[in-house]
Image (cartoon, rainbow, N blue to C red):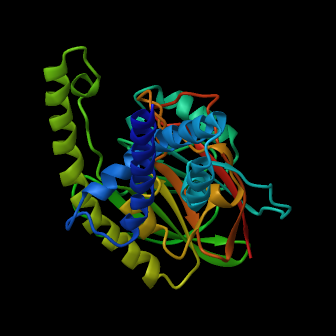
């Protein structure tokens, strides 16, 4: 029995070390060491195991439960990027936005237009839009750039592509909100482009080893590509003469290198005012959040939600309101 407890103690400690190691993504670049980014993908599973083990120690009446719970408190912030119960803001919003990867409208472009038009948002960000994107009733649009597009009811002053590499794309648009100009950035980082047949677990152990190698061969090079894309996006944020509202499909989870770098100095709207789960990608039976809304301090989040009542693509729409101060 003593050996059994020692095994569980070592296993629990290892899980906590791995969870805490995801914070190193704030400083460790994927092109130097990409494996901390792999840990960010496993964060939800590792956190669930951590909670289960904490309860197990409590039930067993072991004092070590206090130690593991105390260390787990260090993970409140990174866990809050996945699931959150923040109090609602009392501010009055004057800007509503929607962001959605529509996967080229494969699930019905008409349905996409009807849904997004019905949201009555001021600005709509879309990724993987395919060809022309034009929601009825929206006067201004940006669909000159591949993959990413924008429709707006607010006047667009200026737009420009943000230099990126790989299969992603991004641009900024300066829009006028109640007499003030803000810069909105729509981004889409290079996707992993998995073949679902090669990812789905199998009963054959050797087959699963082959699939794991395939997944790693897709993940690691893409992480390295993201590093260069993120550099361009960060430069655009830092060079902006206006407050920034950044939205899009990061193809990266919370606590990843991409999340830390892009969100540096900005506010994650979900962390600020979101409630419940932030999971936005539903094509795999695994909790994945890869769609985000970040803003400068002058653009204060008021509400945030992921609309899981509709399936217009393999992503759920992300809807938020802001107060532009």
Looking at the image, which is closer to me, 88 or 209?
A: 209
Looking at the image, which is closer to me, 80 or 242?
A: 80
Answer left or right for 210 relative to 69: left
Residue at the front extreme of this rendering: 2
Looking at the image, which is closer to me, 54 or 244?
A: 54
Looking at the image, which is closer to me, 161 or 314?
A: 314
Residue under the point 22% across and 63% down: 33
Quarter that holds the C terminus: bottom right
**Residue 46 shows up from this direction:** yes
Answer left or right for 21 relative to 209: right
Answer left or right for 126 relative to 227: right
Residue under the point 36% across and 57% down: 144
Residue under the point 61% across and 43% down: 62
Residue at the top extreme of this rendering: 203
Residue 281, x across and y down, in percent: 47, 37
Q: Quadrant of residue 200?
A: top left
Above or below for 106 versus 128: above
Above or below for 273 versus 162: above
Residue 296, x across and y down, in percent: 60, 74
Residue 156, x across and y down, in percent: 55, 68
Quarter that holds the N terminus: top left
**Residue 252 shows up from this direction:** no
Above or below for 270 versus 227: above
Residue under the point 52% across and 54% down: 292
Residue 98, x across and y down, in percent: 60, 49
């Amino acid at each position: 029995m003593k050996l059994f407890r020692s095994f569980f103690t070592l296993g629990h400690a290892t899980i906590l070390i791995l969870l805490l190691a995801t914070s190193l993504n704030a400083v460790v670049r994927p092109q130097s060491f990409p494996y901390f980014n792999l840990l960010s993908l496993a964060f939800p599973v590792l956190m669930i195991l951590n909670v289960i083990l904490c309860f197990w120690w409590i039930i067993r009446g072991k004092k070590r439960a206090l130690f593991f719970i105390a260390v787990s408190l260090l993970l409140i912030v990174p866990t809050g990027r996945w699931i959150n119960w923040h109090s609602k803001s009392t501010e009055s919003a004057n800007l509503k936005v929607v962001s959605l990867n529509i996967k080229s409208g494969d699930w019905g472009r008409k349905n996409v237009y009807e849904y997004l038009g019905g949201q009555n948002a001021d600005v709509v960000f879309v990724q993987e839009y395919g060809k022309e994107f034009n929601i009825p009733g929206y006067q201004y649009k940006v669909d000159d750039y591949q993959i990413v597009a924008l429709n707006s009811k607010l006047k667009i002053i200026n737009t420009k592509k943000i230099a990126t590499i790989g299969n992603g794309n991004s641009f900024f648009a300066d829009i006028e909100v109640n007499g003030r100009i803000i810069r909105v950035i729509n981004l889409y980082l290079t996707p992993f482009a998995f073949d679902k047949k090669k990812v789905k677990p199998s009963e054959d152990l050797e087959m699963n080893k082959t699939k794991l190698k395939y997944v790693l061969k897709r993940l690691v090079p893409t992480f390295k590509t993201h590093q260069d894309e993120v550099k361009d996006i960060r430069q655009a944020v830092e060079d902006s003469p206006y407050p920034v509202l950044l939205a899009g499909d990061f193809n990266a989870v919370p606590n990843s290198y991409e999340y830390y770098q892009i969100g540096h100095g900005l506010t994650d709207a979900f962390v600020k005012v979101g409630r419940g789960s932030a999971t936005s990608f539903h094509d795999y039976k695994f909790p994945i959040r890869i769609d985000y809304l970040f803003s400068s301090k002058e653009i204060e989040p008021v509400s945030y939600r992921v609309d899981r009542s509709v399936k217009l693509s393999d992503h759920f729409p992300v809807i938020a309101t802001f107060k532009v101060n």
